[in-house]
Image (tube, rainbow, N blue to C red):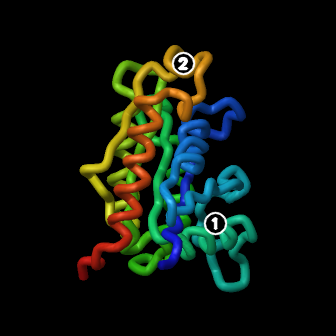
Amino acid sequence: MSTVRILALVGSLRSGSHNRQLAEAAVALAPEGVEVELFEGLADIPYYNEDIDTEADVPAAAVRFRESAAAADGVILFSPEYNGTIPAVLKNAIDWASRPMGSGVFVGKPLAVVGTAYGQYGGVWAQDEAKKSAGIAGATVLSDVSLSIAESVVRFAETHPREDSEVAEKIAAVVAQVAEATKQPVAA
């Protein structure tokens, strides 16, 4: 049986990001037969621009990202909420993944959006925006798979998400659900 590969993209670049910690928990808690790859380098990808997305000019960081996404069986986006919406770095990754239109690297891949945020709703607005954008980019958005953790600054002030038993159980379940979805036939 082959290993299911899930690509984890974190929308926060901050070194102490709770969303990054949540992604690290997903890596650590992945069940047997599932590998979660925490992609490093979203900050290196230039803003999407068709002028540089040509066979001769695609930036190396964008090529590396597309190759990682293409090799993955599924994707999990870890999104904080910035001013009520998705962080620019995560939106930019979705834009690069969406091209060429109709055959980008997310097309047909199961994708879940989770996250934690300072506010009382745990970043649900950003998650909704990320789901919408990823769906338009061709991903099979798993709308029934969700995890929004509120008040991250308080909840994770002294505890890593993988050490919070409730969070650890929920993020492990998300990883398992995405892995299971990779085994479903892709709708035409």
Residue identifier under label 2: 153
Secondary element at image label 2: helix
Q: Is residue 27 above or below residue 57?
A: above
Mark 1 residue type: Phe
Q: Nearer the viewer, residue 96 or 156?
A: 156
Position of residue 110 measured from the top left corner of the image (x, y, whole percent): 37, 65
Residues packed near mark 2 inside 10 Å, few (<14), some (14 to 19) or many (20 plus): some
Is residue 119 toward the left or the right of residue 60 in the image? Answer: left
Position of residue 43 measured from the top left corner of the image (x, y, whole percent): 69, 50
Mark 2 → mark 1, Cα distance in angstroms: 30 Å
Position of residue 135 measured from the top left corner of the image (x, y, whole percent): 34, 61
Residue 9 visible? The answer is yes
Which circle, 2 or 1, is nearer the viewer? 2
Secondary element at image label 1: helix
Residue 65, numbered label: 1
Q: Is residue 25 above or below residue 95?
A: above
Q: Earlier in the sequence, mark 2 or mark 1?
A: 1
Is residue 37 toward the left or the right of residue 187 in the image? Answer: right
Mark 2 residue type: Val
Q: Is residue 133 above or below residue 12?
A: below
Residue at the spot 44% in from the left edge and 32% down from the top edge: 167
Position of residue 181 measured from the top left corner of the image (x, y, whole percent): 33, 65
Is residue 187 toward the left or the right of residue 67 in the image? Answer: left
Residue at the spot 38% in from the left edge and 53% down from the top edge: 112
Residue at the spot 36% in from the left edge and 46% down from the top edge: 129
Disc 2 to disc 1: CB gap under 8 Å: no
Residue 111, numbered label: none
Q: Nearer the viewer, residue 186 or 168?
A: 168
